Amino acid sequence: MPATLPQAVPQSWAPPTSEMLSRIEASLPALPPAEQRVAQVLLADARSFACEPITTLAQRAQVSKPTVVRFCRSVGYAGLADFKRKLAGAVNEGVPFVHRAVDEGDSTQGLVVKVIDNAVAAMLKYRNDASGHAFEQALALLAAAGSQGKRIEFYGVGNSGIVAQDAQHKFFRLGVHSAAVSDGHVQVMSATMLGAGDVVVVISNSGRSRDLIDAADIARRKGAAVIVVTASGSPLAHLALTHHQVLLAADHPEDFDRYSPMVSRLLHLTIIDILTTGVALRLGPALRPKLQEIKRNLRAKRYMPN
């Protein structure tokens, strides 16, 4: 029987913050002290910043007027006028269905800065928000399954299916029985064949895929441990918490209804890297000669210049 979707998102969910402000907050340490003061005035009251004249902004930050302009350019804008125009539309910023951190008419250099700052801001936020306890639970389950010869499977659809393939590629080198499944029907069949000691890692950007929710529920009922990588507050996260499964929350400001997964994909890949590294460490030194041999054998596949 398919899992029942919750009718409402839990109240703990909050709408994403402005990506423009998130990028600026993340770039604070890289700015000169005077420009940091301008940034702090902005972050304290962005609405006023968009309306006040440069003289008032300079006075509030205790800097010169040219410093205010330099700050705007340091964070990727042509000047104060351009910065204020973009700030005024920060709530609905970005180019729909392209990227939420860029604007129409951005220069190539501005595009580079904004896309990279967007990723950096999300990574720094995740570093501060990630639950060490949840990772500890996930690593214990995965390491136990790997050392006991149990199955570790990764489920994802669409872009998350590609992340699942990356996870399987990393885990099979650890000598564990791993598989990546991105077809909804095969996920149901594979989940049905799982048992106690097996582990399923379900990866979803939106947390709303019925295929993944159904497969996760089947795996749970068959006795397998389920680790969910998705946004907190989503139906899949709600299902995981309801049944005391492991939730590795990957929260980000990227609207999955408007944009292709970019930052969310990077966060999911980072989570997989953390899990792979942690499991490799827990499997112990006996694993390392095998990894060394793999690297040695791969050298024969590479062109080596004379």
Image (cartoon, helix red, strand yellow):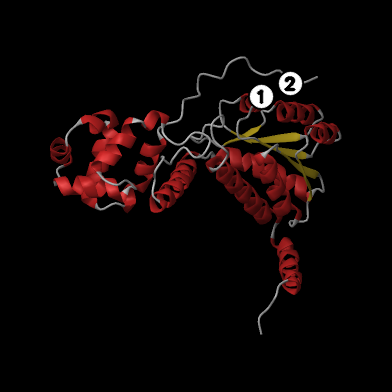
Residue 290, compared with residue 95, is above or below; it is below
* Depth check, front residue: 90 or 125: 90
Name of the residue lying farthest toward the bottom: 306
Q: Is residue 91 left or right of residue 281?
A: left
User: Where does the image place residue 181, in percent across and percent down from the top left?
Assistant: 77, 41
User: Where does the image place residue 281, in percent across and percent down from the top left?
Assistant: 65, 56
Q: Is the residue under label 2 in contact with that under label 1 (CB below 8 Å)?
A: yes
Name the amino acid, label 2: Ala
Of circles 1 and 2, the one toward us is: 2
Residue displayed at 73% across by 21% down = 3
Please rate how many residues cluster around mark 2, counting C-alpha atoms within 10 Å: few if below 14, some from 14 to 19, many from 20. some
User: Where does the image place residue 249, in percent across and percent down from the top left?
Assistant: 57, 35
User: Where does the image place residue 148, in percent across and percent down from the top left?
Assistant: 80, 48
Please rate how many residues cluster around mark 1, counting C-alpha atoms within 10 Å: few if below 14, some from 14 to 19, many from 20. many
Identify the mark nearer the N-term, 1 or 2: 2
- Give the label on residue 3, or none: 2
Q: CA distance from mark 1 to mark 2?
A: 9 Å
Q: Quadrant of the C terminus?
A: bottom right
Q: Is residue 6 left or right of residue 13?
A: right
- Look at mark 1 in the image and give the residue it sits on: 239
Element class at badge 2: loop
Residue displayed at 26% across by 32% down = 50
